[in-house]
Amino acid sequence: VPRDSHDALAPYLDRFVDSDGMLAYLDGNSLGRPLKATAPRLAAFVEQSWGGRLIRGWDEDWMGLGERVGDRIGASCLGAAAGQTVVGDSTSVLLYKLIHAALRLRPDRRVIVAARDDFPTDRYVVAGIAEERGLELRWVESAAHVDEIAHDVALVLLSAVAYRSGYLADVPALTRLAHDSGALVLWDLCHSVGVVPTELDAWGVDLAVGCTYKYLNGGPGSPAFAYVAEALLPELRQPIHGWLGTDRPFEMGRAYEPADGIRRMLSGTPPVIGMLAMHDMLDLIDEVGLAAIRQKSVALTQYAIELVDARIPDAVLATPRDAGRRGGHITIDHPAFVDAVPRLWEQGVLPDFRAPDGIRLGLSPLSTSYDEVEVGVEAIARAI
Ligand SMILES: *Cc1c(COP(=O)(O)O)cnc(C)c1O
């Protein structure tokens, strides 16, 4: 395929670990591939940091790791100045903490807006909190359907890129809309961080969360990040009052006193090993630049759509054709896909199946070639 030979980013494909028997990896939005640099990084950590420094490592290095990695993600991917982003728990737990914290900041309002097309954990967590606190949950179909926010809304919870359709929300416009009615906004960036340029500070975003094992290649179960705009931090209270969310945990104080800064989002011991691998992808993102990554991302999804139109014309594209409203993956629907996907996996072609009848092609720009996209779509066409 000539496209790879014209791709200025093609040389970076070689930075990723080869996977035996894999013809097309189309799931980089679900679990990013490891970089070759990651194995020596992990080995050095075991031998030098953990093995060499032992308990001293906490004071010397690890205790502040969540804040330091948070600042890195903020600078490289989020347009967030230092001191507002921290890495710690899973996305699900950070959603729980931030939704509670947001509701405390709007005590007189009793409505939360959320989207039916959002990822299950987002819907489950917000529904659980609404039930627990007796609040009204007002569902919209998707971020595309939000054109007004009522004055009784405390919080708007949306994903910047929808996990199934790939719809890319107009984050700055929807943030302004929420603010115009006095609501706070919490953006889930799981499917946009590392692939869609984002300017949280400039857009005035209040709160955000996101995964690190997708386009940030942190590895299975690597911890998520939370962002809290500086202006909200002094008042922000999250509900899990752990010792490591305080400024001086080793004073073993009588009562919880939240840390002054973003550290107050934390609760327990930082998942240090889980925060190592993402450094390699952040290094690579800094080397290439998010603008170039987004450019290739748009070209890859465009190419996938052209191939699907030509080779699987009876599949229905669930993703916007307008590149400006599309994230880094596409989803196509066809009743035969449910039976086709296990056979594709056996052949070494790895897309995602998304119920009820969708195939999701996640095209992580730095680790996916145009050739893989073609091999993948060709295999899907044959499999049905
Ligand atoms: C992947 C993803 C999650 C995953 O949450 P975990 O707590 O890490 O399992 C949550 N929300 C969205 C939108 C996602 O894409």
Image: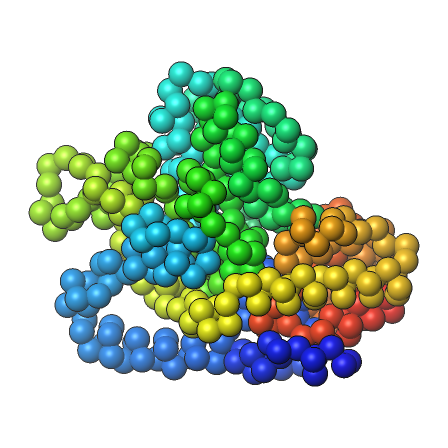
Q: Is residue 302 above or below residue 118?
A: below
Q: Quadrant of residue 38?
A: bottom left
For the residue pair 255 and 281, the one nearer the viewer reads as 281
Residue at 81% in and 57% down = 337
Q: Residue furthest front?
A: 202
Q: Position of residue 298 (x, y in %)?
A: 67, 61
Q: Position of residue 60 (x, y in %)?
A: 17, 66
Q: Which quadrant would residue 2 be assigned to in this image?
A: bottom right
* Residue 281 visible in this rendered orientation of the protein: no
In the image: residue 171, left or right of residue 199: right
Q: Quick one: quadrant of the N terminus?
A: bottom right
Give x and y (percent) for residue 234: 26, 35
Quarter residue 260 falls in: top left
Image position of 68 with respect to 252: above or below: below
Q: Could you tell whether 18 is left or right of 252 in the image?
A: right
- In this rendering, the answer to whether 109 lies above or below 221 is above
Q: What percent of the width, then of the height, locates residue 193?
A: 51, 56
Quadrant placement of the C terminus: bottom right
Q: Is residue 269 visible?
A: yes
